[in-house]
Amino acid sequence: MKYLYGLLILVPVALLLEYGDLGGHAAVFVTSAGAMIPLAAILGRATEEVAIFTGPKIGALLNATLGNAAELIITIVALREGLVEVVKASIAGSIIGNILVVLGFSVLLGGLKHGTQRFDQRAAGANATMMSLAVLALLIPALFAFPSDGRRISQHQVERLSDGVAIVMIAIYVLYLLFSLRGTSPAEREQEHEEEVPSMRLSTAIGLLAGATIAIVVMSEVLVGAIEPTAEDWGLTELFIGVMLIPLIGNIAEHLVAVQVAMANKMDLSLGIAVGSGLQVALFVTPVLVFAGLLFDQPMTLVFNSYELAALVAATFIAVLISLDGESHWLEGAELIALYAILGMAFYFVP
């Protein structure tokens, strides 16, 4: 992952293009998006180092809360700017991307290297059940918001329903964390016998954590400001950019780690990263954005459009099927990636 750090040069380039009024909106979008990649990698690395000092349980909680920090910051900035539909698309795209792209490439490349790979069926089943619950929680507000037999709840009621669902999602996420921290998977038992040696001092890791977070906030401002004009210049919809591009940018570090772990034949850890990150977005990031909308006076309901909901249901369904037998092979990874490609083409043609 060290080669990603060379992309840090894009940080001053993006700032120069933005505040020097050079290159146009598309150049600003591309450079600021590229700059997010090494910053997300640094954030992930610093989080891992801090976790070594704090111990496995607190470290797991730290990773859970900061694992999607880059994307959370991007979406909060977008929400403050009133880009509510882009935020919703980014939520859906992040969940879909983690399930189909991250898990897909992990299973594909791990399977090509090691053949059939096995993982803890019970842990995978628990994650699959939680993911199904999360998608259903996102589905219910939309179903109740649509008219039925001439009856339809008001916009105010939809907002209150979304607030209530967000509270329940946060609560179940906390319970999921407690369950995960109290239980010990085979992969975690293996890690307990491996002594982890920090590669930097705690103060250095915290400094990197703070610095990367501040830089991500600045780059998020630049990136979000270029979304609308870039979409218009490229002939793309904000839905496509939100679903297909922003999630890949914000989660690139986690994507690489999950694939590397799978190629090391540690599928329990790889699945934990891929599916766990999707769960974080659904059960933690999404409710936080609902509450942030109240602070910014930009009400964000959990009413997703039919395209996003169809993609979420399809991605979750195939992920659950793959998790049932406790083993994976490269063809299953190819199937996940194929579904993502199909969804990408579909979102491209959505007006």
Image: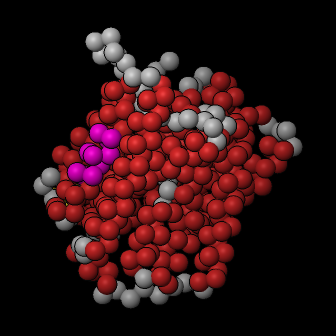
**Horizontal relation, residue 307 to residue 226: left or right:** left
Residue bounds of the magenta highlight: 128-137
Residue nearer the viewer, 159 or 146 = 159
Up-down relation of residue 12 to residue 80 (above or below): below
Residue 276 position by quadrant: bottom left
Question: Disc count in the image?
Answer: 0
The residue that appears at 33% across and 15% down in the rendered structure is: 151
Pinpoint residue 293: horizontal percent, then vertical percent: 57, 41
**Horizontal relation, residue 293 to residue 301: left or right:** right
Pinpoint residue 301: horizontal percent, then vertical percent: 47, 34
The residue that appears at 69% across and 51% down in the rendered structure is: 219
Residue nearer the viewer, 171 or 7 = 171
Q: Is residue 245 visible?
A: no
Q: Residue reaching furthest top?
A: 150
The residue that appears at 78% across and 55% down in the rendered structure is: 12
Residue 131 within the magenta-colored segment of the rendering: yes
Residue 246 within the magenta-colored segment of the rendering: no
Q: Main secondary structure of the magenta part?
A: helix
Q: How has the structure been colored for display?
A: secondary structure
Up-down relation of residue 233 to residue 70 (above or below): above
Q: Residue reaching furthest left?
A: 325
Pinpoint residue 168: horizontal percent, then vertical percent: 36, 49
Q: Residue reaching furthest right?
A: 20
The residue that appears at 73% across and 34% down in the rendered structure is: 25
Q: Is residue 81 visible?
A: yes
